[in-house]
Amino acid sequence: MKTRQVIVKDLPKGTLTQDHFALTETDLPAPKEGELLIRTILMSIDAANRAWMQGATYRAAILAGDPMHTYALAEVIDSRAPKFTKGDIIAVETVWADYAVVPAKGAQKMPPVETLSHLMSVFGIAGKTAFHGLLSVGRPLPGETVVVSAAAGSVGAYVGQIAKAVGCRVVGIAGGAEKCKWVVDDLGFDACVDYRDPAWHKALKAACPEGIDIYFDNVGGNILETVLFRMNERGRVVCCGAVSQYDATAPSGPRNLPGLVVVKRLRMEGFIVMDYAHEDTTALRALQNWVKSGAIKVPEDIVEGLENAPAALIGLLAGENRGKRMVRVGPDAV
Ligand code: NAP
């Protein structure tokens, strides 16, 4: 059987472009014992895709010639593993392709849901990352001020909404006045600061009159440096990612470390969403309740077609997306 797939033709050194990718066709082997033949439905597009091209992270690096790896929702077409049968919908690590043969180990059978894409946004990695990072690492108290960067993105949108739901004052940081307006008007943040405005540090000060108790950092770099100046004593900096550095040729900021961490007695802690897998059931129950009550909205940004996956990733890094970006490769199963 043949499948289309998108490979990383050349590894980027600076800004990612279409030239780094190629759409190819390849033969798929029949699944062996312990493997599944799957049909991709939705692929998650993540800033992490770009980070994987920079070298090994919490997972192996992508090399030139490799298909791009992804987290996807897929339908089992053929199973050589006892736990799965044809027609199952699974969450699985696969590649940018219409079809793939994957190990069954690591695949997870999904429950029936009303809206399949929610398993990739609010009930997927984005929602769980926001929940665990904010509540377990940041540990907010009602009345505290929470600031989150990449606020209109998939993780940031939930961080802010969860922080509001637990009684915090929430300030987003995002690129562009229009995006900031959306974060306030549609997502219900108390304020949002446009970091592309040269005077944004003054706007941040004005938006946080009582300082910042928790900074949920999705971007690193100069934004992290600026926010550290406004942290309150005993504040918490939740280090979730560093998207400002993934496409950069040289690293930037922060230059005020460890000085400000010492003086302000800050706790700065990184985490990976899988660290809290043992608390996923609690997270999902809470997220379901918030979605049902309307306390949390589910912004999704779905790009159609496997061939558009490179553009979807390039656009994500340029800040095109509002909410969770994914690529629809095929229709939901009937
Ligand atoms: P995302 O918001 O869907 O997309 C990235 C957003 O980052 C863009 O929309 C853009 O919005 C912003 N951005 C891009 N370049 C920037 C720059 N130079 N400076 C400031 N902002 C920039 O991404 P996501 O999926 O929510 O991920 C957010 C972060 O969480 C990433 O760093 C990712 O690696 C990390 N993450 C970590 C875990 C974990 O387990 N620790 C899990 C999932 C994700 P603007 O228009 O606002 O610039």
Image (cartoon, rainbow, N blue to C red):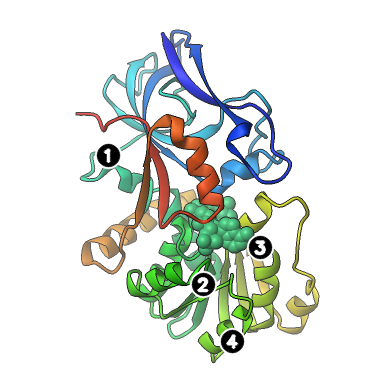
**Which residue corresponds to mark 3?**
220
The tag on residue 111 is 1
Q: In what quadrant does ligand 1 lie?
A: bottom right
Looking at the image, residue 23 sits to the left or right of residue 247; the answer is left
Residue drawn at 72 percent across, 39 percent down: 55
Q: Say whether marks 2 and 3 touch (CB < 8 Å).
A: no
Residue kind at label 2, given as amino acid type: Arg
Q: Earlier in the sequence, mark 2 or mark 4?
A: 2
Residue highlighted by disc 4 = 205
Mark 3 burial class by Cα count in 10 Å: few <14, some 14-19, many 20+ = many
In the image, taking residue 18 as reference, residue 307 lies left or right, namely left
Q: Which of marks 2 and 3 is in front?
A: 3
Alpha carbon separation for disc pair 2 and 3: 20 Å
Residue 46 in the image, given as x and y percentages of width and height: 51, 46
The amino acid sitting under disc 3 is Gly
Dot 2 or dot 1: first in sequence order is 1
Ligand 1 under 8 Å from disc 3 Cβ? yes
Closer to the eye: label 2 or 4: 4
**How many other residues sit within 10 Å of disc 4, few (<14), some (14-19) or many (≥20)?**
some
Q: Which of marks 1 and 4 is nearer the N terminus?
A: 1
Picture layout, residue 299 above or below residue 87: below
Real-space Cα distance between discs 2 and 4?
A: 22 Å
x, y (%) of residue 246?
Answer: 66, 50
Say which residue appears at 75% left-offset and 50% top-offset: 249
Q: Please report whichever mark, 3 or 1, sits nearer to the chain's N-terminal start.
A: 1
In the rendered structure, which amino acid carries the disc numbered 4? Lys
Label 1 amino acid? Pro
Badge 1 density bin: few <14, some 14–19, many ≥20, Cα 10 Å: few
